[in-house]
Image (cartoon, grey):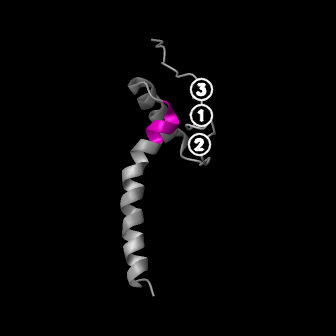
Amino acid sequence: MVTAEKVAPMARKKKDTEGNDPPTKAVKIDRALASKAQMIATDRGVNLADYISDTLRAVVEKDWAKMVRRVGTGADQ
């Protein structure tokens, strides 16, 4: 049985209020994980970059806060 897969068009970078491209960084992730993330993003009607950024933001901010507290107290020395 052959099934069609929804494929989102390439996402365009969102510009800020002054029309500048947002600061972004290319990263490499596991291909299978990227494929799953793309399917989820397509299903939700968002682009892949926004989906990954929103998904990672909470984890990264939590780890960032922990690191800042640790470094600020000198616990790593």
Looking at the rendered structure, the secondary structure element under dot 3 is: loop
Q: Could you tell me what secondary structure mostly forms the magenta stretch? A: helix
Q: Marks 2 and 1: CB-CB under 8 Å?
A: yes
Q: Earlier in the sequence, mark 2 or mark 1?
A: 1
Q: Is residue 47 above or below residue 77?
A: above
Residue 36 lies in the magenta-colored region: no
Q: Position of residue 55 (x, y in %)?
A: 40, 44
Q: Amino acid at mark 2?
A: Pro
What span is in magenta?
47-52
Q: How many marks?
A: 3
Q: Is residue 64 above or below residue 44?
A: below
**Circle 1 is placed at which residue position?**
13
Tell me the quarter of the image containing the N terminus.
Answer: top left
Disc 2 to disc 1, how far (Cα)?
Answer: 7 Å
Q: Position of residue 12 (x, y in %)?
A: 59, 29
Q: Amino acid at mark 3?
A: Met
Tell me the quarter of the image containing the C terminus.
Answer: bottom left
Q: Amino acid at mark 1?
A: Lys
**Circle 2 is placed at which residue position?**
22
Q: Marks 3 and 2: CB-CB under 8 Å?
A: no
